[in-house]
Structures are given as structure tokens and as C-alpha cells.
Image (cartoon, rainbow, N blue to C red):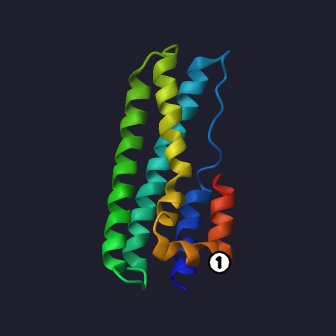
Amino acid sequence: MWARTMCLALSPAFSQLGTQPQPDLDNPAATQQAVVTYLTNAGNATQQTIDRFSTIGAPPVANGQQILDRIRTQLVHTRTNLADAAAQLGAAHPNDSAAIGQAFGAAGNVVRLIGVLATYPELRAAIDQTSECQHLAATNGRR
């Protein structure tokens, strides 16, 4: 039940993200802006996820509160990394391929958010057996 509630709570945050932008080598400025926007939206979705965990509470497993605290810490680090990447890319020259490459790497972290939850064996079985979690993972690139 906890996994279902958690995935239902996370779904609105992820549904607003859309897909990760693809590089347009003919228009680096547009690529830069698309990635900055995506990273900003991903940071907002991550913050919404953090906020929603407060309402869900700890999972009903051994050390549930410790697991929730670790997940929250990982999400805070992810949010910070996304914000830093967006700021760095926004300040970079559009033709700075290294900055754009780093930003795409940071954008890949969004797909890993649901994976953060699945790294806990105590939660993995519940997540794998919950259709709402399977749908959330599938629509965000994790299969």
C-alpha cells in the first residue's frame, strides 16, 4: 500500500517533465535553452517529490524512517545538482559542447529518481509489484 501511495504521489511531478531534450547541432542556443528549461523543471519535480514524501511518511518496513531519511537526502543532492547544472549551462556560451554534455549528464539523473527508491531491497518488491510504480518507471525511462 505504501508503494502505491508513493508512486501515485510522485506521478504528477514527473508527468510535467516531458522527455529529455535532444541536441540540435544546427542550433546550439536552442539546445542550451531546452536543456536549461528541462533541468529547471526537473529540479522543481524533485522538490515536489521531496515535499510529497513528507505527506507519505516512512515505509512500513524495518528501519523505514532511516530509509526515508536517506531517500530524502539523495533527492536533496539530486535537486542541488540539477540547479547547479542549469545555472552553469545558462551561464555558458551556447557553443560550449563540454557544458552542454555535462548538463545532459545531469538531466540523466532525473531518470534515476525512481531508481533511488528501488535500491532499497526492503522497498524493491513492493515497487515491482505495484502497477502505479511500474507505470511511473516506464514513463520515465526505467524498465
Q: Quadrant of the C terminus?
A: bottom right
Crowdedness near tag 1: few (<14), some (14–19) or many (≥20) residues, C-alpha within 10 Å: few
User: What residue occupies the far front of the structure in this picture?
Assistant: 121
Vertical relation: 62 (above or below) 127: below
Q: Secondary structure at mark 1?
A: loop
Residue 106 spot, x, y in % from top left: 47, 38
Q: Quadrant of the N terminus?
A: bottom right
Q: Quadrant of residue 139?
A: bottom right
For the point 44% across and 27% down, the residue is 89
Q: Quadrant of residue 53?
A: bottom left
Please state the total of marks drawn on the protein image. 1
Residue 1 can be seen in this image: yes
For the point 48% across and 65% down, the residue is 117
Vertical relation: 41 (above or below) 87: below
Which amino acid, by three-letter code, is at mark 1?
Gln
Residue 36 can be seen in this image: no
Residue 99 spot, x, y in % from top left: 45, 23
Residue 62 spot, x, y in % from top left: 37, 83
The residue labelled by disc 1 is: 129
Q: Quadrant of residue 35?
A: top right
In this rendered view, identify the residue nearer to me: 134 or 36.
Answer: 134
In this rendered view, identify the residue nearer to me: 75 or 34.
Answer: 75
For the point 39% across and 67% down, the residue is 51
Vertical relation: 28 (above or below) 57: above
Vertical relation: 123 (above or below) 71: below
